[in-house]
Image (spheres, rainbow, N blue to C red):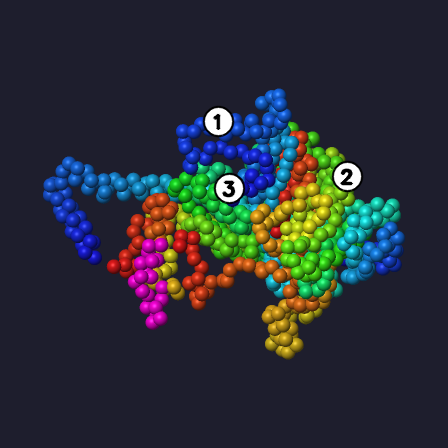
Amino acid sequence: MGNQLMPDAPGLELIAQGIEEGREGTVIETSVEHGKATLIVRPDGVLHTLSWLRDTPDQGYRFLSSLHAADYLPATPRFAVHYELLCRERVERINVKALLEDPADTNGDAEKLPELGSCVDLFPTAEFQEREAYDFFGIVFRGHPDLRRIAMPEDYVGWPQRRDFPIGGEPVLYTHNEIEAPRWFE
Amino acid sequence: MEVERETLRGRQLRARDLLRGDLEGKDLEEYVEERLLTTTLEKALNWGRANAVFPMTFGLACCAIEQISLVTSRYDIARFGAEAFRATPRQADLLILSGRVSIKMAPVVRRVYDQMLEPKWVMAMGACSSSGGMFANYAVVQGADKFMPVDIHVPGCPPRPEAVLHGFNKLQRLVRGKPDLGWRQRYNAIGTEEWARFESGEPTTEAIDRAAQAVREQRDMRGGSAGVAEEPPDSWGTS
Amino acid sequence: MSDELLRDEADVTERGVDRNTEDPSAPLMDATAEIAERELEGPGLEPEQEVLTINMGPHHPATHGVLRLIVTLQGERVIELKPVMGYLHTGIEKSCEDKSYWKVIPFVERMDYLSYYFQMEAFCGCIERMVELEIPPRAKYLRVLHMELDRIMSHLVWLGTTALDIGAISMLWYCFRERDTILDLFEMSSGQRMHTRYFQVGGVFEDIPAGFEKKVRAFCALMPTRIDQYEALLDRNEIFLQRTREVGIVSRERLLELGVTGPLLRAAGEPWDLRKVDPYLAYGDFDFKIPVGTVGDGYDRYRVRLQEMRESVRIIEQALDGLPEGPWISDDRKFVLPPREELATSMEALIHHFKLVTEGFRVPPGELYYSIESPRGELGCFVVADGSSKPARVHFRDPSFVNLQSLRDMSVGGLIADLIQNLGMLDPIIGGVDR
């Protein structure tokens, strides 16, 4: 079965140590699950982690497969941004997961958005994908050259893929509620 | 009822005069025009419009691929005269909405529809443009009916090209002025919508009038009688 | 509303006099003169050097869907390009959070609507890994067979529509003739032409019917001759060569930086194909080659895809030759419906059936990213499960979305006609870009 290639658990520990050496307190946890190696890091250490993984000579994770965000409501920290990295020479994948708090909780101010440093300088492929994470979750990437909505209309209000955003749509019409929806000419 | 009887009587008298040879001049011309020329001309025009529909290349999503395969040799749409797909709305007659209409795209679709010239028709191909399809969420307009008049809906996800051609044939019948009746018209059930019912279950005359008025308005918005039945059928039971 | 969008995003747009609403006697030239004056950069610039920002799409015959491009031109040269997406955003990822895992499969099929088998495999494969479910070998071979048929079909549609954009109009009819043959095969095995929902978690939905193998073999005998026909039409066609040679070249390093995968990357010389480097399903059992280009221009991309079609035919033949006997879906009743004969005799089967149909199976908490090679590149599926019968997050790393970032590099500095051709050679499917 594919997608089974990854640094094994001891290898992952060594990587975590290497990252910690560069910057203390970055790595919260390492985990190996279903054949996937994950490094859980603090948001302020993400750029350090990514550049360490990319630039250290024997690591060489130079390809960012995917950058995606997830909302773990009601767990805290609420948001996580995942960076799927790939080393093409050894065909190994590693996942860096940055956990973000939702500032609206702590401050009580619903307008504040979670922030993270942008990795567009390290991996130019992240440009569209960070815009997508901003559009759907409201995660602001500091330093992104052009952070604006990508899939929703420019003036849309709300972050659609957050868990507390309603799915929307309309109730399906059956004979018992056929009356409700107005048609375009009414 | 009174008005009808008068016009009917008037028509009878004029027919009698024609047969006697008593109509002359302007009256005769008017009579001939009304009866003979205009109807035949209208019919000929509608026949021409039906057999030379120019669809517009407006593929949105998956249904667009089935729409392209309509043009190709197996499900040839050229046999119905519609192979000239025009890219510009100014030259197109038929807007085939093939695919899901998202909220960002809806104003664009409406603008393209407005730029088309009369007479124009719209086919909502597939479940997504007819009613939102399987996507009952924040991002898809639940049916193109919500913001533009649609003449014919073709169900399917995506509909087979044969199904689209069947819908296209129905549209051609509509254009020629002999539209297929909706089931409520055919079975004399116009007042049976939920909103038209009394508590007792009888259809009310106000509701029937409202329905008839709505259909008439829809026809007027589309620009005259081109392609739509001349009169609401008698089976509606109005007055 | 579109007007406001244009004003916000670009400095000025092309504005003709709207004849319907404005005074028809006002001369048309005012608008263009206005644009010219406003756009002149600096004093003393000649009128031939003015820049013009135009808006292509979202309704445009050549944008392969509803993609909007804001192109800044100087004469006919493209100096800046900004794609605007979102006109087909369907909220699929959000809808999936509300549906049980089975019901997600038809949703994710419809993202990249030409490679539906690949999206099914990405999702089902991800779930199978999360629940550690082994699929039987026959199911693996059947999945590979259908996926390779889908790859051929996707490349055929690409070839037909791109050749149409470039001007070789008759290619459309030839390619769609073969596509209809493939769709007949899909209809035979699953009942639907497109969006077949054939893969299930645990294997495939149903065994292939009698006569399917014969038809697939007939197709495999036919297809190489047809590919020869396409090559005879386009390979050494003077016009095609002049339009595609040396056009849209991006260096391999830049493509890797931009995250581009698939035939685009292979045309630039990088032999990267997830079927070979990281075999999943039964790809390790088959003997096939990966076509790799040299220069990375439009002509190389065309050649790579044609050759991929040939290799896919070889894989299908090998899959048929080696098709193992056995069940076509796993027999783990927790995730797979029991066969109907068992329902009459076994109480346990009845309970499993009931639970699966009403609630669906549960996936233990966890998350996983699984990626496969779709006709456009690396298609990844990320699923977060929270222990219930509905996924908590489904995200697809769509290849068209990431590959679209390279359009700018390809087209800036070239002619606008080359932009159309680059867009075609990029093979974007806007359903995947917008999801």
- The residue located at (49%, 32%) in the rendering is C16
Judge whether residue B201 is colored magenta. yes
Front position among marks 3 and 1: 1
Mark 3, residue position: B57
- For label 1, the crowd category at 10 Å Cα-Cα, with few meaning under 14, some 14 to 19 and many 20 or more, is few
- The numbered dot on residue C252 is none
Give how far apart the Cα atoms at labels 1 and 2 are.
Answer: 46 Å
Q: Which residue is mark 1?
A: C29
At a point 69% along the width and 40% down the height, the residue shown is C406
Decide: marks 1, 2 in contact (CB < 8 A)? no
Please report the residue visible at 69 percent of the width from the left and 48 percent of the height from the top: A130
* Image quadrant in which you'd find residue C107: bottom right
Against C184, residue A175 (above or below) is below
Foreground mark, 2 or 3?
Answer: 2
State which tag comes first along the sequence, 1 or 2: 1
Amino acid found under the numbered disc labelled 2: Glu
Cα distance in 3D space between marks 2 and 3: 38 Å
Q: Using the image, determine if residue A14 lies above or below residue B118.
A: below
Q: Residue A51 in the image: state x and y as whole percent.
A: 81, 47
Q: Is residue C358 left or right of residue B120?
A: right
Element type at marker 1? helix
Disc 2, SS:
helix
Dot 3 falls on a residue whose secondary structure is loop
Q: Chain of mark 2?
A: C
The quadrant of the picture occupied by the N terminus of chain A is bottom right
Q: Position of residue C110 (x, y in %)?
A: 60, 53
Is C348 rendered above or below residue A31? below
To which residue does mark 2 refer? C253
Q: Split into 4 quadrants, where in the image is the C terminus of chain A?
A: bottom left
Q: Which residues are magenta?
A: B196-214
Which residue lies at the image location 83% right of the left edge and 48% below the top edge? A52
Residue C293 colored magenta? no
